[in-house]
Image (spheres, grey):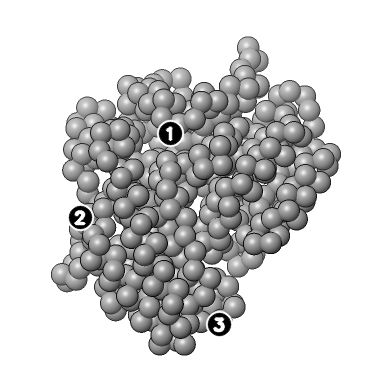
């Protein structure tokens, strides 16, 4: 009997093989039949310090024996309280409140609801959300609504609300983006602008300079439009700094974090808010409270994993590892840029991306499954976005394994050229 499991972003009708992973260690996964797989995308961008990190695993085991779960509405626990305080100490000043959830999509949903609640509770009729072209913020209804329309969500169009779309700041078109944002912010009822800082992940690893992010934030501030930074993917060092916003000197009104929050070990997310947004919901009137929760909000075991992650950031040379990986990625990208068949080489911190072939069919490019199969045959976990191949490994990946990944991309590009 075939597996009854229905996998995400998988067309089972293609009957592609689905390897069974038995264990992980560092930047390597092992299949049940003993194959050694290099995890070149951090298992969908979550694993930062490596699989089965001993400090995180120990924290999970210890917490599981003390308190596994408790309702968080009207109750609290020490791991969540500590985590909230430590996050505020680590992250930029100006964000004063921490709301827990369980995924990046949910963190975005929470931010959108907080933004709309802010204006509603102040008695100001602002409700329009602005987003950046090609963006992706998750697969729940609100997150899909603020993402690019297309194959990801066309079947669910009746559920989605309309948003204002600002053109992506491609090279030479940065001012057009800023002008469009300024005009949109002037429009009536503009509530918030939501953006992936510096790198649009699922949109194709599209990258833009920090100065553009700085200017976008300034435009929103001038018009009193709330600025929401979705750092679910870009946070926790991926772009070279703890947050991508740091490179632009930006402090958002709302900040979404997930993925690397627990080092990639357990699902946990946070939406951090400014004091003004919290104050708009603070009242003796229960009708003005923030209406959002999930059963596992601030799960104690997940919070313990996140605390272990923060300890690793404080006590281990994580930033040095990130810098070393970024340097190695830069050297590999320079070599790839010389290979026939490779176009648009680009980098943001520990992330590199290139485009292969001439197939412009986007996410449904026929090239993607062919490349996926070829990389799988080479014992590499690489998952192309259409004809875009990107490398975003755990920070602990060895130089040899990283070189193996770069060499495989080069060989596939030559075969296509």
Question: Are the two marked residues, 3 and 1, in contact with CB atoms closer than 8 angstroms?
Answer: no
Q: Residues within 10 Å of mark 1 (few under 14, many from 20)?
A: many
Q: Residues within 10 Å of mark 2 (few under 14, many from 20)?
A: few
Where 296 falls versus 95 (above or below)? below
**Residue at 30 percent of width and 45 percent of height:** 320
Query: What secondary structure is marked by label 1?
Result: loop
Measured as percent of width and height from the top left, residue 19 is found at 28, 70
Q: Which residue is mark 2?
A: 25
In three-dimensional space, the C-alpha distance between marks 1 and 2, rounded to whole angstroms, equals: 28 Å
Residue 231 placement, left or right of 134: left
Task: Determine if residue 202 is in view.
Answer: no
**Residue at 67 percent of width and 35 percent of height:** 226
Measured as percent of width and height from the top left, residue 245 is found at 53, 41
* Image depth: mark 1 or mark 2 in front: 2
Question: Are the two marked residues, 3 and 2, in contact with CB atoms closer than 8 angstroms?
Answer: no
Q: Residue 297 — which label?
A: 1
**Residue at 76 percent of width and 34 percent of height:** 223
Which residue is at the front of the view, 3 or 20?
20
In three-dimensional space, the C-alpha distance between marks 3 and 1, rounded to whole angstroms, equals: 45 Å
State which tag comes first along the sequence, 1 or 2: 2
Residue 323 placement, left or right of 365: left
Specify the farthest residue to the top.
284
Residue 183 placement, left or right of 119: right
Q: Residues within 10 Å of mark 3 (few under 14, many from 20)?
A: few
Q: Which residue is mark 3?
A: 358
Which residue is at the front of the view, 391 or 322?
322
């Amino acid at each position: 009997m075939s597996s009854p499991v229905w996998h995400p972003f998988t067309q089972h009708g293609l009957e592609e093989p689905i390897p069974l992973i038995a264990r992980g260690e560092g930047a390597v996964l092992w299949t049940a039949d003993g194959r050694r797989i290099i995890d070149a995308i951090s298992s969908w961008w979550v694993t930062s310090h490596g699989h089965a990190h001993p400090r995180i695993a120990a924290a999970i085991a210890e917490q599981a024996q003390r308190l596994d779960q408790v309702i968080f509405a009207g109750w609290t626990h020490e791991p969540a309280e500590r985590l909230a305080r430590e996050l505020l100490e680590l992250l930029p000043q100006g964000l004063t409140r921490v709301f827990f959830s369980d995924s990046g999509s949910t963190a975005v949903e929470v931010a959108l609801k907080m933004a709309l609640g802010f204006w509603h509770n102040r008695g100001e009729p602002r409700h329009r959300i602005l987003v950046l072209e090609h963006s992706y913020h998750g697969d729940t209804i609100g997150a899909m609504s603020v993402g690019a329309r297309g194959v990801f969500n066309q079947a669910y169009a009746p559920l989605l609300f309309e948003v204002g779309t600002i053109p992506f700041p491609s090279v030479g078109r940065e001012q057009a983006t800023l002008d469009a944002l300024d005009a949109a912010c002037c429009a009536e009822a503009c509530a918030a602008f939501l953006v992936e800082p510096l790198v649009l992940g699922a949109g194709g690893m599209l990258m833009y300079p920090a100065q553009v992010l700085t200017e976008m934030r300034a435009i929103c501030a001038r018009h009193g439009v709330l600025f929401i930074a979705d750092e679910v993917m870009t946070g926790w060092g991926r772009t070279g700094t703890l947050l991508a916003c740091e490179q632009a000197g930006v402090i958002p009104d709302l900040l979404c974090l997930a993925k690397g929050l627990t080092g990639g070990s357990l699902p946990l997310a946070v939406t951090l808010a400014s004091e003004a947004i919290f104050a708009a919901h603070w009242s003796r009137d229960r009708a003005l409270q923030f209406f959002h929760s999930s059963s596992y909000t601030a799960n104690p075991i997940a919070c313990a994993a996140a605390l272990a992650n923060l300890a690793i950031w404080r006590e281990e040379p994580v930033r040095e590892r990130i810098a070393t990986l970024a340097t190695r990625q830069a050297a590999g990208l320079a070599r790839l840029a010389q290979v026939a068949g490779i176009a648009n080489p680009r980098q943001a911190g520990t992330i590199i991306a290139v485009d292969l072939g001439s197939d412009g069919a986007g996410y449904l490019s026929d090239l993607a499954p062919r490349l996926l199969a070829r990389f799988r045959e080479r014992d590499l976990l690489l998952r192309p976005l259409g004809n875009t191949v990107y490398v975003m490994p755990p920070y602990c990946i060895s130089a040899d394994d990283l070189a193996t990944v770069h060499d495989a991309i080069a060989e596939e590009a030559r075969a296509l050229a």
